[in-house]
Amino acid sequence: MKIFRSLIIVVLLQIYFSNAIAQELMTYSVPETYEMPPKLIPTGRKYWVSLPKDYGKTLNRYPLLFLFDGDEDYLKNLILADVDQLTRFGEMPPCIIVGILQRNRALDFGPLYAISSLPNSEKVNGDIFFKFIKEELTPTLERKYRTQPLKIAIGHSLGGLFLLNSFTKDPSFFNGIVAVSPALELGRDSILFANLENTLKSDLKKHTYFCWASGTEGVNEKAFRAGSQKLTEIFDKQPNKRFDFKFIDLPGRSHNLTPLYSMLGSMNFLFQRWNISAWYRELFAGKVRDPIKYYERRRVSMETLYGFNEDPTEDRIQNNIGKELFTAKKYGLALPYLKKAVDLNPEDSDFNADLSMAEEKSKKYSDALRSLQRALDHLAVKNEDYKEKSSKFKSDISRLELLIKQ
């Protein structure tokens, strides 16, 4: 009866999320599908990509978020919906989301020691598939899109097993790992557990965040539960200053429901130190006496923790620092920040208007006129305050033209 009830819930959730994604996402584009020609792997491999909606308007660079089992609709729609809302509210940075379609999960995800008896395991296995991700797919994505060094990966069941195995092969590749109900077995995966211990003893090149979840109901969760508990034992025994981990315990949850009940907590753990919304609250509360030092501290911290030499929301950060300096009447100091925001997002009407005000206060009237004209040109007609803003911009343009003539 419990299994039947769980299946009904999964079906209903799948219908719900399918309908939700059929509607327009708030912050991400509808996924587009592509295919990699065969090379390392003997068959072509399809994947889909969903970009931040403002990708084409800005010069910001974004992390890559890989979703394995990207052909599973309930998982695909869950991730898209959760990431969309978390991005919208500033709980995680905007990412380039990449969903990978699996042809044979056992071969794609299985460590060679576990699947060596399967047909074609010498041609496709977890090690080769990881090499494909590293040497073919990722370089292709990095050439095509503006990316950051940060790479996040989400895998469920065998996908979680694959991510653990990949971490031991190259611990610096994925900086954020979410393994939901990883398909771990104590006896079979003793090699993997030993490799994990050895990896954590090493000097990790990058800070890595690892989060995993486990339920208690159903055949799969009961089979994999001990393996998930073994991970806690290993991580506690081998602490590493560049490795943060969190276990999400889901008593009463079955294998197919663990992604639903763990994803928000996982993303929150991965990005709790990024948390731009909390950072802005401090900035706007009037508690920050020196916005420049405040920004520099964050920039250094984000580069150390996430590899961001420029934040994926850098245009907004630069604009807001500039506005704080402008409010403090430090117009000369505000200018480079407001200018950087416009350079990163030249079509943002508000950024151009903010820059114009600082340029006018600095008596750079010709520059202020050009910035304000760009603000008017890029003002969206669909904005509720379009008439009010356009009228003000036109009035200010006339005033600046008179100042220039004097």
Image: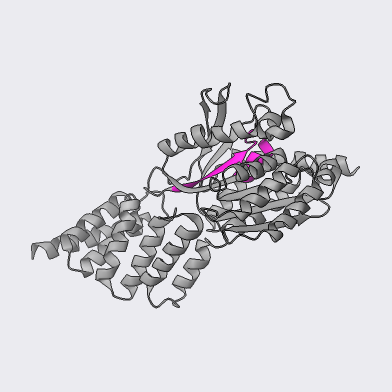
Q: Indicate whether residue 332 is drawn in magenta.
A: no
Question: Where residue 207 appears, x then y in whole percent?
Answer: 54, 56
Res. 180 visible in picture: no
Residue at (70, 47) in percent of width and height: 194
Q: Which residues are magenta?
A: 62-80
Question: Where residue 149 appears, x then y in whole percent?
Answer: 46, 48
Residue 268, placed above or below residue 50: below
Residue 243, placed above or below residue 297: above
- Left or right, 372 with respect to 277, comes to left
- Left or right, 45 with respect to 146, comes to right
Going by the picture, which residue comes out furthest to the right?
Answer: 1
Given residues 214 and 11, the one toward you in this image is 214
Residue at (58, 62) in percent of width and height: 241
Q: Quadrant of residue 15?
A: top right
Question: If the image is split into quadrants, where does the N terminus sit?
Answer: top right
Q: Indicate whether residue 78 is drawn in magenta.
A: yes
Residue 120, placed above or below residue 239: above
Given residues 308 and 229, the one toward you in this image is 229
